């Protein structure tokens, strides 16, 4: 779904859910070059405070791009900024729920500010906010 700027309302929200697999983690590491052993080496990760491998934080954060770019506002919007705070680790096999909610609209610049969060069940794993540019309805 795609919204034009005129369609947006404060508190409008959207969600995207994804269960993370071993394949997702390996592909992300290969694509980005982030081969931190926290993500790919079970033996190394078992000796850390987490006790096991954790999913790349930026892989989790990338689902915010999905919810914003594909659902709210959707195709045609342009990401301008994203603040992120990683709150809790995500593990392989967990389902991440990426959520975005509009909290402010800037009509003069066609921009929207959204609160962005990722959850695993009832645990907040990532919080932040985003600023996006949204096209107007064609004349």
Image: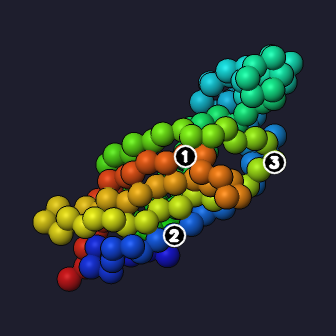
Q: Position of residue 37 (x, y in %)?
A: 73, 20
Residue position marked by numbered label 3 in the rendering:
93
Asked whether disc 2 touches disc 1, contact meaning CB atoms under 8 Å apart, the reply is no
Q: Residue at x 13, y 66 (%)?
A: 108
Which badge, 3 or 1, comes first in the chain's sequence?
A: 3
Q: Is residue 43 left or right of residue 97?
A: right
Residue position marked by numbered label 1 in the rendering:
126
Q: Position of residue 20 (x, y in %)?
A: 75, 48
Which badge, 2 or 1, comes first in the chain's sequence?
A: 2
Which badge, 3 or 2, comes first in the chain's sequence?
A: 2
Q: CA distance from mark 3 to mark 2?
A: 23 Å
Eye-nearest disc, 3 or 1 = 1
The C terminus, quarter of image: bottom left
| SS at circle 2 | strand
Residue position marked by numbered label 2 in the rendering:
14
| SS at circle 1 | strand
Q: Is residue 117 left or right of residue 4?
A: right
Q: Residue at x 49, y 76 (%)?
A: 1
């Amino acid at each position: 779904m795609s919204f034009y700027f005129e369609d947006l309302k404060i508190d409008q929200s959207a969600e995207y859910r994804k269960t993370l697999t071993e394949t997702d983690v390996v592909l992300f590491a290969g694509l980005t070059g982030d081969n931190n052993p926290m993500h790919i080496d079970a033996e190394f990760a078992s000796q850390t405070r987490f006790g096991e491998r954790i999913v790349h934080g930026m892989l989790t954060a990338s689902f915010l791009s999905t919810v914003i770019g594909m659902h709210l506002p959707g195709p045609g919007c342009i990401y301008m900024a994203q603040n992120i705070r990683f709150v809790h680790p995500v593990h392989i096999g967990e389902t991440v729920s990426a959520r975005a909610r509009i909290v402010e609209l800037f009509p003069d610049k066609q921009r929207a500010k959204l609160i962005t969060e990722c959850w695993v069940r009832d645990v907040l794993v990532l919080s932040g906010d985003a600023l996006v540019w949204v096209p107007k309805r064609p004349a």
